[in-house]
Every structure is written in C-alpha cells, then in structure tokens.
Amino acid sequence: MGRPTVTDIAREAGVSLATVDRVLNARPGVRAKTIAAVTEAVARLGYVRDMAAANLARGRTTRVAILLPDTESQFVQTLQDALEEAAALATSARMRVDLHRYPASDMHALAALLADLAAGGISGVALMAPETPVLRDALRALQAAGVPVVAMVSDLPNSAPAHFVGIDSHAAGRTAAMLMGRFLGAKTPRVMVIAQSMLLRDSIERRRGFDAVMLRDFPGIEVGQTLETHGAPETLRQVMRLSLESSGPVGGIYLLGSGHRALAQVLSELGLLGRVVTIGHELTPHTTAALRAGWMDAVIAQNVGHIARSTLRVLQAKADQQPINESQERLRLEIILRENLPPSP
C-alpha cells in the first residue's frame, strides 16, 4: 500500500473530503463525534501530513525570529552564516526568517526586543543567550502569548523552552576531562579553567561534567576555579597572570567557551603557547588554525549546519503544531584533533 491520502482518510472515516480538510485545518463547524472519527482514521492509516505542501496551497508564510549575541565570537558568526544559508533554502517552503543581533551584555535590551517581536505577530523565536532572571521572565511572557521558544547551543531550562537544539554539554565536559587527563601525562598536574561567563548554561554543564570525571578518574590532578573573562582580552590576561602567580604553573587549560584568539595571544606573551595541554570547544577558523599549529590539542564541536537546519525545522513544526522528529534533531558531539581535520583548501 502506498502513502495514505486524504481520500483514504475520508473513506475510512465515512465522511467527505471537505470534512477531512476542515478537521485537519482545525476549522470550526465540525461535530466532536466527526472530529474523533477523522482523528482515529488518521491514526489507523498512519497518515503524515505534508505541512510544507499544505502551507504552499494555503499561501501561508511562517515568520520566525532568531536572536544571536552581538559579539566578535567566530563561532557565533559561523552559526549566523549557517542560519542565513538555511533561511535562504526555507523561503521555498514559505518560511521567513528575521535574524537579529542583540547587545550581549544587555539583557534588558534583549527582553525589549522579545516584547516587540511578540507584538509583531511572530510565529516562533529561537535564541542563543545566557539565562538571567530578566530573560527568563521575558521568555515566559512570550510563551504565555502563544509564541514557542527554541533555545540554541546553550539551554534555558528555567525558562521552559519548547525545544533545545544543541549537544549535551554535560557529556561534552566529561569528554574534555577524559582527554585532558590522558593528554597531561607527565606535565604539571594542575588545570586552569577559563570561561567567558558562567551565566551560560552550556558553560555550567561543561564545568560540571568536567569536574565529575576529573574527580572520579584523575584525582591527582588539581583543577582550579573557573576564571571568568566576560569576553575582555585584558581581563583574561589579568586573571591568568594572577592565577599563575598565586598557584604556580599549569599543565593544562580548559576553555569552556569563546576567547581562543585572546588565549593564544596571552599564552604567547607568557611563553606557554604549545607548552600546555589546551582543550576548547567549537570548530572555527581560529581553532582550526590552532589545531594545525599544534598549540590546541583537541576541540569538542557540534555541527553548525545541523543546528541551523534543526532550528528551522523545529520552529516550523511548532508553528504547524506537528510532532518533532527527535532522532533527526539530535546533534552529535564531535572530537576534532589535528589528525582528523579536513584537508586545508
């Protein structure tokens, strides 16, 4: 038997095609008994509606907004490029994607932007942001207004988003710890941990996973407290110098988020570039170059193209009130070493 059609549903439920159309599109004027009969027929036949075709037939356009922090992070720019490419392809399915950059340190500005979007009749919002009380309240208000929210890269569990698109950050931290413990060898058994901000859920989960494995499998390695830089190279320089002066030399550095370019400069100034085990996250032009040069030992990454496509698919499914294909949207954690980098162009 081929793929079931609306004609099959009508025959199975004993109703007209017009009635099936009204039920599938949630239009009024259909008795509860008839809705139940059509719904049961859909379930028995295993009918899966082609929502893209339905939207095209109705001339319906889904308008969504995606919000990214306005930083110099190469990862964020790489993600934006992937989102723009996915958005261009999505226009054929009548999806319009509005991409916004917000001031990374101003959650009130982000909350105001979200309020404006809600008032503008948006069908869904996806964002990458730290979970602060101001943002949590803004997202709850957005969802209370019927606008689904998708968290990208860094989860927002206290804001109860409709979906999260990203890797398991706790597992990523555990993986980083296993690599760090094995790579350190005879080097100084002390690790420095650096983060842009511990308000980011992915940084929190990475640190938790890292600590869990280090305590269990490498108890002889001392792991320092997280040094926050807030994206400022001068702050990174200061906290690293103070840490080295107060606690002595390190054998490894774990970078929880962005800041690879600034870290390379500071390590070079301190005479440590290429002399300490360095593990970070996200494959960017800079981390790729660092792996090739040998001063970074490993990068734990996620596919930005998959993030972009998955985000748009999830937003469309939420707008259409359709189920999400969880297996399709599950992102894999990737371990990138110099040895498995793709050939340079």
Image (tube, grey):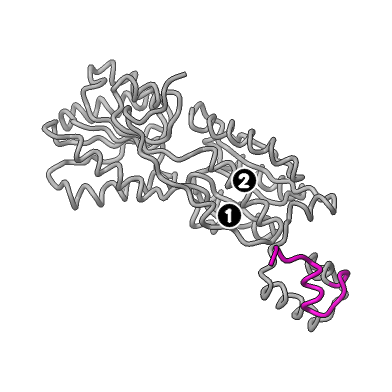
Q: Is residue 31 positioned above or below 227 on the image?
A: below
Q: Which mark is residue 111?
A: 2
Mark 2 residue type: Ala
Dot 1 surroundings within 10 Å: few (below 14), some, or many (20 or more)?
some
Question: Seen from this angle, which residue lies furthest bottom?
Answer: 33
Q: Residue 233: which quarter of the image?
A: top left
- Magenta span: 1-19
Q: Is residue 303 positioned above or below 35 on the image?
A: above
Q: Can you give x and y, in whole percent of width and height, for residue 102 in the image?
A: 60, 35
Q: Secondary structure at mark 2?
A: helix
Q: Can you give x and y, in whole percent of width and height, for residue 32 in the image?
A: 79, 81
Q: Which mark is residue 137?
A: 1
Q: Along the horizontal axis of the image, is 10 left or right of 47?
A: right
Mark 1 residue type: Asp
Q: Residue at x 54, y 56 (%)?
A: 159
Q: Which circle's residue, 1 or 2, is located before the other in the chain? A: 2
Circles 1, 2 touching at the beta carbon (< 8 Å):
yes
Quadrant in the picture for the N terminus: bottom right
Q: Along the horizontal axis of the image, is 44 left or right of 94?
A: left
Dot 2 surroundings within 10 Å: few (below 14), some, or many (20 or more)?
many
- Asked whether 30 falls inside the magenta stretch, the response is no
